[in-house]
Amino acid sequence: MDRKALSLPILISLVVGNMIGTGIYVLPASLAEYGTISLLSWIYTSIGAIFLALTFGSLNKRFPKTGGPYVYCKEAYGHMAGFIIAYTYWISNMVSIAGIAVASVGYLGFITPILNANTPAYNQYVALGCELGIVWLFALVNIIGIHTAGVVQLFLTIIKITPLIIVSLIGLGSLHVANLTQFTTGHESTFTAISSAAALTFWAFIGLESATIPAENTKGSRDIYKATVFGTLATCFIYVFSSFVIMGMIPVSELKSSQFPFAQAGTMLFGSYAAILIALCAFISGLGALNVCTLIQGQIVFAAARDHLFPHIFAKLSRHDVPVAGQILSVSLVSLFLILSIEPTLLKQFNNIALLAALLTLVTYFATTLSELKFIIQSGTFTIKSIFSGSMLIALLAAVYSIWMISSFETSIISVGVILILLCIPVYFLVIRKYAEADNRN
């Protein structure tokens, strides 16, 4: 594989670009349901994300191979665990692509009523057609080559963070303290409100491991570590700061019914034309995250197929180092999911998809933190003193954070996630294990 394909700036753009997708542009409206106490959810989620980023950076130094979480879990717990994590991570990534496509097209509704779910002119089938179109467009971009996808990502990341920073900085002058005093909007406890809001905010942190996935297309683990940690830190700051400003500008009662919170803030600050520009940037932001997720979905299938845990056809690379078969299969499944999950209300469809993707990703992250703990315990230098080492503490905190986040999901979402994960176990025993054994004999 081409180890020069992805430089440090491109790797950072993969991390920032995957996390800062449509989430930050849409979530202020979803979080307003819980009140401004949801700002604490951003902070807690940011801290947990940093622990996870440090854990992923450490694991990549141990195993600098393409595949990220799949590789770490396979090395720690064997082929069956590796297959389950590869499958779970692959599914979560495809669900994320669907969620990003829905939210991206939703922001175009600020420009045209036919895509605005809050107007009578809204047509869910036109919206579906647009979603399918951008999903297949970025599959084509990634099939052209991983370096091309990386350069496109760097460009899209610069575009996506610019309006967030501008609106947040200038919006500081339009804050109203009264808008920040409505801490809760329901009768649930403070802990319940924070936990429920955190389940949604975590959607915006999916992708912090992005730099570890195409590891063999980079210059090495040092670049990957820097991109993972610094990219996560920068994203955390942007999330907390911009959400604080938006909630200070727009009353919670108004914000929770807004489909375009940042565009609305842009209208307040600069007028309607600026708001249209922000809506376009939000759409482009979604495209950037979709581009990274599309890159990842092919790489994870490739990594598992190379280890005989997926059919061998998915391990074949094109002359541009792209696993074309994996990309085509993945984007076809994403298209099917978009068709099956279509809803008359865009925000409802987005929330359902976002929560399912976040849950499946959290399961992957939790398994990854357990892998790091096992490697630390089994290392030749493990002593009582090392139990209290920084790496052990970080991995433990990341694991505890993952468990807390998983427990914050509603039973219905957890049930769907459990069913999806359990479905892969008979597939492993009935198909994959026999296939792998036959392939190894040959």
Image (cartoon, rainbow, N blue to C red):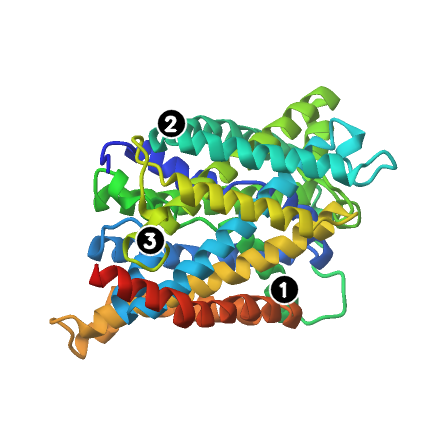
Crowding at dot 1, Cα within 10 Å, few <14 / some 14-19 / many 20+, comes out as many
Amino acid type at image mark 1: Ser
Amino acid type at image mark 2: Thr
Disc 2 versus disc 1: distance between alpha carbons? 39 Å
Q: Earlier in the sequence, mark 3 or mark 1?
A: 1
Disc 2 versus disc 3: distance between alpha carbons? 24 Å
User: On the image, numbered disc 2 is attached to which residue?
Assistant: 148
- Residue sitting farthest toward the left: 380
Q: Is residue 190 above or below residue 21?
A: below
Q: Quadrant of residue 108?
A: top right
Q: Quadrant of residue 170?
A: top right
> If the image is split into quadrants, where does the N terminus sit?
top left
Q: Is residue 174 above or below residue 256?
A: above
Q: How many marks?
A: 3
412 or 308: which is nearer to us? 308
Residue 187 spot, x, y in % from top left: 76, 70
Crowding at dot 2, Cα within 10 Å, few <14 / some 14-19 / many 20+, comes out as some
88 or 23: which is nearer to us? 88
User: On the image, numbered disc 1 is attached to which residue?
Assistant: 196
Amino acid type at image mark 3: Ala
Disc 3 versus disc 1: distance between alpha carbons? 37 Å
Crowding at dot 3, Cα within 10 Å, few <14 / some 14-19 / many 20+, comes out as many
Residue 193 spot, x, y in % from top left: 66, 65
Q: In the rendered structure, find residue 305 and report the number of the disc placed on it.
A: 3
